[in-house]
Amino acid sequence: MGSKNKLRRFKENETFENVIQPSREELINDNFPFKGKWRELVFKNDRPIVLELGCGKGEYTLALGALRPETNHIGIDIKGARFWRGAKTALETGLRNVAFLRAQIELIAFAFDNHEIDEIWITFPDPQIKYKRTKHRMTNPEFLKSYQKILKPDGIIHLKTDSEFMHGYTLGLLQGLGHEILYSNHNVYKSDHTPDVVRTVQTFYESQYLAENKPITYLKFKFGS
C-alpha cells in the first residue's frame, strides 16, 4: 500500500464515528474516557462485548457483528490503515454493533475496565516462533493476564490459527497454568464437531492458507479461578 493511500485512510478514519484512536499517553495515564463505558458511550446499550485482537482488515469483527446482532463487537489493531476497510464497511452496511480501536494489544488493560469484556477472539496472530520474540506472542503469560483482567469471570477466549506451533504452545501453557480447555481441534475443516462460526467465517489470509492445504487449528478456553 502506498504512503498516499495510508495517509488518506488515516484521515478518513478520523471522520468515522465507529473508530476510536487514543494516544498511548492517554491510555497509560488513565485518561481514556471510554474505559468502563464502552456500552454507554459507543454502543448505547448494555449488550455483551466481544473483542477481536489483531483484527487486520476487520473481517472477523464484521462477520461476527452481522451473525450476532445481539452482541457488540470491537476490532483492535495498531494498524489503522488495515482496519479502515472494516470500519468503512460497517458504516456502509449499517452495522451499529461494530467498532474499531487503534491500540497496541499490550495496552488492552488500559482501554477496558476489569470484567468489561465477555469474549475474545484471536485470529491468525504472528506465532513469533523465535525465542527472543516470545514477549510479542499474543498468548504469552503476560498477555493472558491482561485478557483475564478485562474478561468477565466466565468469559471465553478463542484462538484460530494456521500455526501448529502457536496452537501447541498455547495449549501447553494453558494446561500448565490450570486454565480450562473447552475445545481443541488441529484441523477444523476435517472435523464434524467444529462450531459453525469457526468454519463459516473466513479471513482473506485464511482462504489463502486453505488454498495451500494448510490445516487451520482452533482452541477455545476460559481462565481458571
Image (cartoon, rainbow, N blue to C red):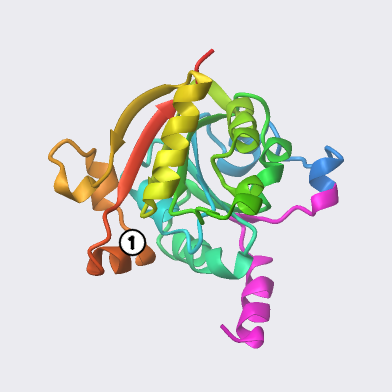
Q: In percent of the image, x 66 and y 25: which residue is there?
A: 114
Q: Amino acid at mark 1?
A: Glu
Q: Is residue 128 visible?
A: yes
Q: Which residue is mark 1?
A: 206
Magenta region includes residue 10: yes
Q: Is residue 48 visible?
A: no
Q: The C terminus appears in which quarter of the rendering? A: top right
Magenta segment boundaries in residue numbering: 1-25
Q: In percent of the image, x 71 and y 43: which residue is there?
A: 107
Left or right: residue 154 versus residue 19 is left
Label 1 neighbour load within 10 Å: few <14, some 14-19, many 20+: some
User: Along the line of sight, which residue is nearer the eye, 151 or 9?
Assistant: 151
Q: Position of residue 2 (x, y in %)?
A: 60, 86
User: Along the line of sight, which residue is nearer the eye, 212 or 31?
Assistant: 212
Q: The N terminus appears in which quarter of the rendering? A: bottom right
Count of numbered tags: 1
Q: Secondary structure at mark 1?
A: helix
Residue 42, quarter of the rendered image: top right
Q: In percent of the image, x 71 and y 56: which residue is there?
A: 21
